[in-house]
């Protein structure tokens, strides 16, 4: 019997074969759409996208969670039995926008404000915000949810050359085998290798001008 949360329970594809993560083009469209949202929704969505955090983890953030000068956010990993906090770097532009809007640096000096959540929404509200952004970006199906963003963060980080153990830490995974599953996504470099293979002999490569006859019979 497979233990709960065993790595093989996770995957990049659903049982139906549907992809669970956003590809690079989809993620770019979603990030652009997020920036057009009202400020608080935009900042929540972008923080979710750039930390790989879970909705409940990002909703739990307060001014005390941020190191503004280092552009680092400390996220409490909620799916661990023991208390665990991970530090995740975010783009400096995003940190500056968060600091301006929520006055994080100022709030950190006030004991009454330092531990007040930045976003007071319920999980359902946050989930709906992300779902609407996905639809507006032309993303449908399994990837069109907060988990699709988390999967995209992991795939994108690994394809950008971030070491596996670092991505594991950023995601808060207890087992590196779980993180390694994301390395199975077909990346740009992999496609380039395939292109070399396709063009080893261009005379035999199918072209738009001469459609191939896949049944082995000549056309015409």
Image (cartoon, grey):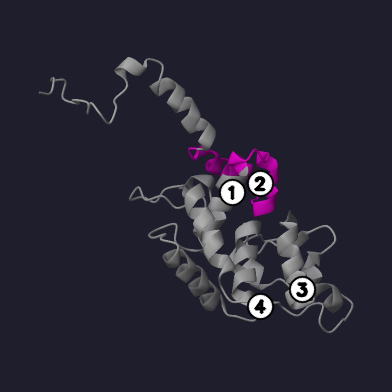
Label 1, residues with CA under 10 Å away: few <14, some 14-19, many ≥20: many
Of helix, strand and loop, which one carries label 2?
A: helix
Q: CA distance from mark 3 to mark 4?
A: 15 Å
Instruction: Find residue 189 and report its horizontal and vertical position in percent.
Output: 54, 32
Looking at the rendered image, the disc whose residue lies closer to the viewer, 2 or 4, is: 4
Q: Is residue 172 above or below residue 8?
A: below
Instruction: Find residue 47 and report its horizontal and vertical position in percent.
Output: 65, 64
Sooner in the amino-acid sequence: mark 3 or mark 2: 3
Where does label 3 land, which residue? 100
Q: CA distance from mark 1 to mark 3?
A: 28 Å
Sooner in the amino-acid sequence: mark 4 or mark 1: 4
Looking at the rendered image, the disc whose residue lies closer to the viewer, 3 or 2, is: 3
Where does label 4 land, which residue? 119
Where does label 1 land, which residue? 154
**Residue at the spot 73% in from the left edge and 76% down from the top edge:** 101
Label 3, residues with CA under 10 Å away: few <14, some 14-19, many ≥20: few
Tell me, yes or no, whether the highlighted magenta stretch contains residue 116.
no
Sooner in the amino-acid sequence: mark 1 or mark 3: 3
Sooner in the amino-acid sequence: mark 3 or mark 4: 3
Of helix, strand and loop, which one carries label 1?
A: helix
**Residue at the spot 85% in from the left edge and 61% down from the top edge:** 69
**Residue at the spot 65% in from the left edge and 50% down from the top edge:** 174
Give the residues drawn in magenta, as a range.
158-186
Q: Which mark is residue 167?
A: 2
Residue 64 in sight:
yes
Tell me, yes or no, whether the highlighted magenta stretch contains residue 168.
yes
Cβ–Cβ under 8 Å for marks 1 and 3 = no
Q: Is residue 106 left or right of residue 3?
A: right
């Amino acid at each position: 019997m497979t233990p709960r949360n065993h790595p093989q329970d996770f995957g990049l594809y659903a049982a139906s074969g549907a992809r669970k993560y956003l590809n690079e083009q989809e993620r770019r469209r979603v990030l652009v759409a997020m920036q057009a949202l009202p400020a608080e929704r935009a900042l929540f969505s972008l923080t979710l996208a750039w930390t790989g955090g879970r909705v409940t983890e990002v909703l739990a953030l307060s001014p005390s969670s941020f190191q503004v000068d280092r552009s680092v956010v400390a996220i409490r990993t909620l799916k661990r039995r023991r208390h665990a906090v991970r530090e995740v770097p975010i783009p400096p532009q995003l940190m500056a926008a968060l600091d301006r809007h929520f006055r994080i640096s100022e709030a950190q000096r006030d004991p009454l404000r330092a531990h007040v959540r930045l976003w007071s929404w319920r999980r359902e509200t946050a989930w709906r915000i992300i779902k609407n952004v996905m639809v507006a970006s032309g993303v449908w199906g399994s990837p069109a949810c907060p988990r699709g963003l988390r999967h995209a963060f992991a795939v994108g980080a690994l394809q950008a050359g971030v070491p596996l153990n670092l991505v594991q830490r950023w995601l808060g995974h207890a087992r590196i085998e779980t993180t390694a599953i994301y390395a199975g996504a077909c990346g740009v470099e992999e496609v380039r290798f395939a292109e070399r293979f396709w063009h080893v002999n261009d005379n035999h490569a199918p072209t738009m001008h001469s459609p191939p006859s896949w049944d082995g019979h000549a056309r015409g």
